[in-house]
Amino acid sequence: MSAVFGFLGIHERKDMRNIFRNLLIVLFVSLFGFGFAQNTLIVARAADSTGLDPHTQTSFASFRLLELIYEPLVTLDADLNIVPALAESWSFSDDATSLTMNLRKGVVFHDGSSFGSEDVKASFERLLDEETGAAGRKNFTSIESIDTPDAHTVVFNFSLADVPILAAMTSTGAAIVSSEDVAAGDFASKTNGTGPFVLESWVPEEKTTLSANKNWWGEGPYIDGLEMRVIPDEASIMAALRAGQVDFALLNDPLIATLLIDDNSVVLNKATALAYHVLQLNASRAPMDQLAFRQALSCAIDRQEVLNTASLGYGTVTGPLTIPAYQLPASELFCYQSDIAKAKELLATVDMPDNYKFEIIVASSEPPTALSEAQNIQAQLAKVGIDSEIVSLELSVYIDRWLAADFDSAVALNGGRPDPYTMYARYWTKDGNLQKVANYIDDTLDSLMAQGRAETDPAKRLEIFTEFQKHLAEMSPWIWLYNDFEYTASQPYVKGFIPMSTDSLYYLSQVKIER
C-alpha cells in the first residue's frame, strides 16, 4: 500500500500546482481586464478530447466536443425520446427487419458539400468495417445491406429483427460523415460535420475554438461560437466560474458540484444520469469464478453507504438498468440490502486461495469519486473477512489493464444508453465486443438479449429486460452501485441550455447570452 500512497502523493502535489496555476490565471485576467467576445460562450472543463474521429472515440470528453460538430440520423430530447436530426422521419417494416429513413433536405457539410443518402451509406459501411475500429460496431452488425433509392431516402436491411438499432443511431458514435471524407480517409486531423458548430482550432490539453455554423439546418446557434478551455482541477473551474471568467462549466465531481447548490451567483444544472457506478468483477479468475464468492460480495456491500460516502448521498442505488422506463426498485434485486450474515455464510462455502488478497483497481482521476468508492468498499469487505488492496493507476494504464481484463475488480463509471440492448450487448452477449472485459456470459443472458433485440411490443420488452437484470443481479458478475447526476453550471445570463441524462452538450446550440 505504501507504493499506492506514494503514487497518490505525487498526484496530489501535481493537483496543487494545477490549482495555483489556474487560480493565478483567473486572478491575472480579473486584474488586467482581458475581455472576451460578448457573444462567444467560454466553456471550462477538466478533461480534453482524445481525438477527432467520431466513430472511434470512446471517452466522454471526446463526445462532448464531437457532438457539437457531427450529427447522427436521430437524437434524443430531454425525456430520452428519439427525435429527428438528419432524418426527418423513419419507419420499420412490420417484422422489424428493415428501416426506412427519410432524410432532411437542404443540409450541407461544413465544407459546403451537400448531405444525402450516399453519405449515410458510406458512414455505416465505415462503421461496419472492422479495420475502422468503430466503438459502436456491435450495435449495427445486423445490417446486411443499405439501399439508396434516391438522394434523400435510405433503407437499412437487417439479417434479423432489430428494434433497438434506432436508439443506437442516436449516438455520436453513429454520426454521419461525408462520403468524400470516407474515401479520403482523414479523420484524425480535421472535422467536417453537419452540426451546429464548426471546429476552428484545437490545441490539445489547452483550448478548442468553434464558430457557429451559419448554414446549420436547425434553429440557432444563437451565439457566435464557443471557446472550450481545459482547466484540469474542478476547484479551479468553480473559482473561475464564481469570478465571472467563464460562462459555462462541466462538472464531474459531485463534491464540487454540490458546493454550488446554495450559490445564488451561478446556476447549477443537473439531470439524472444514465451512466452508472459499478464494481466490475473478473469472473474468469478465482475466486470470482465461484458464484458464492460473487454473491457474498454483493451481500456484503451496503450500496447506500458507498453513495453517501462518494457522492454525499446525491443519487440513487441502482441495478443494471438506469433507464427510467426499465429501472427496477432495489428491493426486487438479489441482496441489495446489505446482509453481513448471509455474506459470511456464502463465504464459508468458497474455496479461497491461500493468503488471498482481493485487488481493486481505480483510475486516479476518472471518475473523481473512484478512490472514495474503493476505500469504502474495502472497509465494508473487511467486516466479512475479505482482505483487499486498492491499486490506483493513471487513466491510460487503467484503461489498458481494463481492456486486457487484467484485474480482480475495477471501480468504473460506465455510460448508459436509452435502450437496454444497446446499453449491454457489448458486455453480455457471446459475441459482444467487450465480452472479454466482462468475462462472464451464460445462455440465459445471451437468450434474453436476443429476445429483447427482436421484440417490438414495449410491454413484452419490459418483461424480457426485467428478467434480464434480475438474473444479472443474482449472478453478480458485477456489483452495480448507484447512478447520480450529470452536472453543469453557468452564469445567470446564459439562457436556454437543456441538461441531458446522457451528459450531452448538443443543446448548446439553443443557448443565448443575455448579459
Image: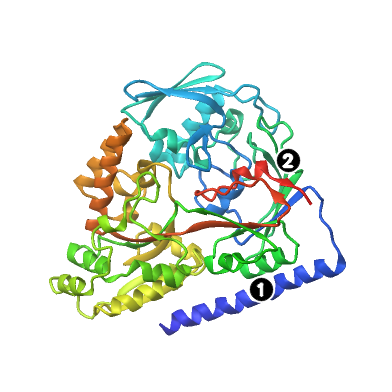
Q: Residue at x 44, y 42 (%)?
A: 136
Numbered mark located on residue 364 in the image: none
Res. 268 image quadrant: bottom right
Alpha-carbon distance for marks 1 and 2? Answer: 33 Å
Report the mark closest to the observer, 1 or 2.
Answer: 2
What percent of the width, then of the height, locates residue 408? 31, 67
In the rendered view, how is the structure colored? rainbow
What percent of the width, then of the height, locates residue 346? 16, 70
Q: Residue at x 75, y 62 (%)?
A: 245
Residue lying furthest left: 349
What percent of the width, then of the height, locates residue 33? 86, 64
Dot 1 falls on a residue whose secondary structure is helix
Q: Which residue is mark 1?
A: 19
Q: Which residue is mark 2?
A: 222
| Mark closer to the chain start, 1 or 2 | 1
Res. 332 image quadrant: bottom left
* Image position of 499 (left or right of 447): right
Circle 2: residue type = Tyr
What percent of the width, then of the height, locates residue 191? 64, 40
